[in-house]
Image (cartoon, helix red, strand yellow):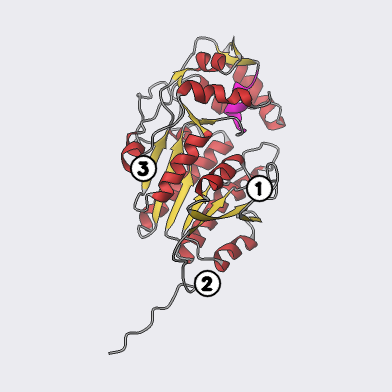
Amino acid sequence: MTQPKKTPRPGRPPARRAQRRKVLITGIGRQLGKILAKRLDPTCEVIGMGRKDWVGGKPSGIHADAVALDRSKAEDCFRRQAIDTVIHLEYVHSPKMPAEMRYRINVVGTMRLLDFCRKYDVRKVIVLSTAHVYGALPDNHPYIEEEDPIRAEQDYAALHHMIEVDTYVRSWMYRHKDIRTVILRPCNIIGPTITNSMTRYLRRRYCPTLLGFNPMMQFIHEEDLTEAVALAVEKRQAAGIFNIAGSGFTPISDAIREAGGTPVPFLHPLVYTSIRILWPLGLTYFPSPEIDYLKYACIVSTKRAEKVLGFQPRYTLLETIRSIRSAIR
């Protein structure tokens, strides 16, 4: 008896390449995307997608499209190629960008990306979230695990977007169990090339702290984070939520000193008020809700990542903190 031919999903290319998997990285124009592309290149065929504002120009040696996920042309990348794995790093948090545009890129862009993954038969999806979704609260217990609730302050738009993305991807993951989905929640990412609110803070000569507070902090080197992402790609059957952090933790005052700065304590009501005024103008590196992470600890457990992904940080805590000294202050 003749078996009917299987009808491919709409737009799916007829066959996959037998050898190197095609891995799409969104946010390829940023530092993490470039480091990750270099790490994966020997074993995977890396394809990039990102907004037009590339950091240091387009990455060399790979095909990269300058297109945002909220644009109609973004789907062309999936139509043209049999993408096996998608790594989602594309987020924007600048207060200088209109709030509606940030939401469209961060939240709507993620939703559209997942729609493309479903439509074009992507086998694995890896989404970068953040450990900050757990929140910095006075009753946090040490070593927060992946099953613990998300309790972060949502007044800060960027963090609110990450909570919404994290929540949406978790729901999508349970609805589409045929696609191996990974959510990574890293602690504070720092390193010599990355630029975010924490690295801008630690690169200052004088770092404001909150008088009477000196919480423990976790950090992860940018290269250790990209190694965790690469392991999530290589472990084909790995799926679920994973906290990612470097080795050990330290009081924020010690981290500032090891980075070459000097902590300067201020009354915290003054700090919150000043930043609420300065952040919308783009005149400060820390939005006011993130100041909570200089007040209370948010220490995560990495046991699941160690067991399932085989993740072990290569950089020590001191090496991670001191690595930002090589960056231009």
Quarter of the image for the C terminus: give it: top right
Q: Majority secondary structure of the magenta segment?
A: helix
Dot 2: what SS?
Answer: loop
Left or right: 33, with 235 as reference point:
right
Badge 2 is on which residue? 11
Of marks 3 and 1, the one in the foreground: 3
Dot 1: what SS?
Answer: helix
Q: CA distance from mark 1 to mark 2?
A: 28 Å
Estimate the x, y position of residue 299 in percent, counting from the top left.
40, 26
Q: Amino acid at mark 1?
A: Met
**Upstream in the sequence, badge 1 or badge 2?**
2
Where 23 falls versus 252 (above or below)? below
Badge 2, how many Cα within 10 Å: few under 14, some, many 20+? Answer: some
Tell me the quarter of the picture where residue 210 sits: top right
**Upstream in the sequence, badge 2 or badge 3?**
2
Q: Magenta residues, as a range?
A: 195-204
Q: CA distance from mark 2 to mark 3?
A: 32 Å
- Residue pushed farthest bottom? 1
Estimate the x, y position of residue 7 in percent, counting from the top left.
42, 78
| Label annotation for residue 101 | 1
Dot 3: what SS?
Answer: helix
Tell me whether the residue at label 3 lies in contact with that at label 1, contact meaning CB atoms closer than 8 angstroms: no
Left or right: 133, with 57 as reference point:
left
Q: Give the residue at x 53% y 39%.
A: 160
Q: Amino acid at mark 2?
A: Gly
- Residue pushed farthest left? 1
Of marks 2 and 3, the one in the foreground: 3
Q: Give the residue at x 49% y 55%.
A: 44
Tell me the quarter of the picture where residue 283 sits: top right
Badge 3 is on which residue? 309
**Upstream in the sequence, badge 3 or badge 1?**
1
